[in-house]
Amino acid sequence: MLPTHEHRTGDGEAGGRGVDVRHLRAFLAIADEGSVTRAAARLRLSQPVVSRTLASLENHLGVRLVDRSTHHLALTAEGVLFRDKAAAAVGAFDEAVDSGRLRHWPLRLGHAWSAFGPYTTPLLRTWQQRHPLTPLELRRIDDRTAGLTRGEVDAALLRGPVDAPGLVTELLFTEDRVAAVAADGPLAAGRSLSLADLAGEAVVLNTVSGTTTLDLWPPHARPAATVTVANTDDWLTAIAAGRGAGVSGASTADMHPHAGVAFRPLDDAPPLPVLLARRDGPGHPALPRLVSLAREIVGRSRP
């Protein structure tokens, strides 16, 4: 059990008394910032103190929590699991000792593109009004789970089926799919398009964070060529340059307008599910409020 105090030694490092809240705060800052230097600045401690505090915590637990092999520090699999427990423990400690001056850890919400679609602004504004002491940070991360499986966010807005282990998902709504074509190309002349219309073109696929694959087309009518990119910006650029057409959710047309790209309804493509995902564990204490608000906002405008 964690002690109900924060012990400080002369140089600012918790020491000599096992694991206490300062160890957890240092680890959470490193996990959030991806850098010992930035974590130290955030905590107003020296970099050596933060490094030693992390090492002390890892020694106590007997596992490596942070991968130090790259310039941008990343959590190990054990670190991802421990982060949720550490955040919950720190939140409970703060609330117990001073509920009127609670230090709320930011709730980090990831997305790969288009966020919450038309509900993005209402979600952010309503959250700020109702929970001003708990910052909701929207982070775009080009990853199929928007950084969720790597521990970079607490929850994520994802599109399409997600089969990553250890995640819990909730369907919030579905959105129609649209075709994205060069604005000055022949396909832009149509009011709507079909999958067959795109089969004669190369198709631009975002293979890192996108949801469209050749499986969207019937096996006998798939596009003959593909162009692969790694993010939404490159996807739009390739389409605008006439290198191929693309398929995405309707929110992309509103969230990522591009002068060189025309979006058209795709009549025969199945709708795209929009999910709120989190790791299967205790997680950030504000997650239930986020789920509830997301449902409420979608429910305001949908039957």
Image: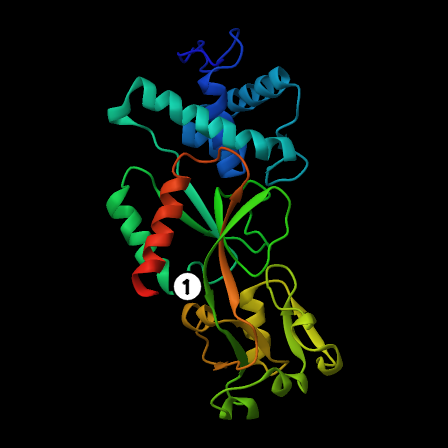
Q: Is residue 135 above or below residue 225?
A: above
Report which residue position mark 1 lands on: 117
Asked whether, in this view, residue 135 is left or right of residue 101, the answer is: right
Whether residue 16 is visible: yes
- Give the percent coordinates (x, y) of residue 169: 52, 49
> What's the coloring here?
rainbow
Quarter of the picture holding the C terminus: bottom left
Q: Is residue 53 above or below residue 79?
A: above
- Give the percent coordinates (x, y) of residue 53: 54, 19
Q: Is residue 189 above or below residue 15?
A: below
Q: Amino acid at mark 1?
A: Gly
Q: Would you identify the image quadrant in which residue 94 lies?
A: top left
Residue extending farthest top = 16
Q: Would you identify the image quadrant in which residue 167 lies?
A: top right
Q: Would you identify the image quadrant in which residue 115 lies?
A: bottom left
Report the residue at 54% width, 41% height from top.
279
Whether residue 136 is visible: no
Report the residue at 55% width, 40% height from top.
151
Under circle 1, the secondary element is helix
Mark 1 surroundings: few (<14), some (14-19) or many (≥20) residues within 10 A? some
Mark count: 1
Report the residue at 33% width, 59% height from top.
299
Report the residue at 28% width, 20% height from top.
98
Q: Depth check: 186 or 302 in front?
A: 302
- Give the percent coordinates (x, y) of residue 88: 45, 28
Asked whether, in this view, residue 92 is left or right of residue 33, the answer is: left
Q: Depth check: 247 or 299 in front?
A: 299
Asked whether, in this view, residue 145 is left or right of residue 104, the answer is: right
- Give the percent coordinates (x, y) of residue 295: 37, 53
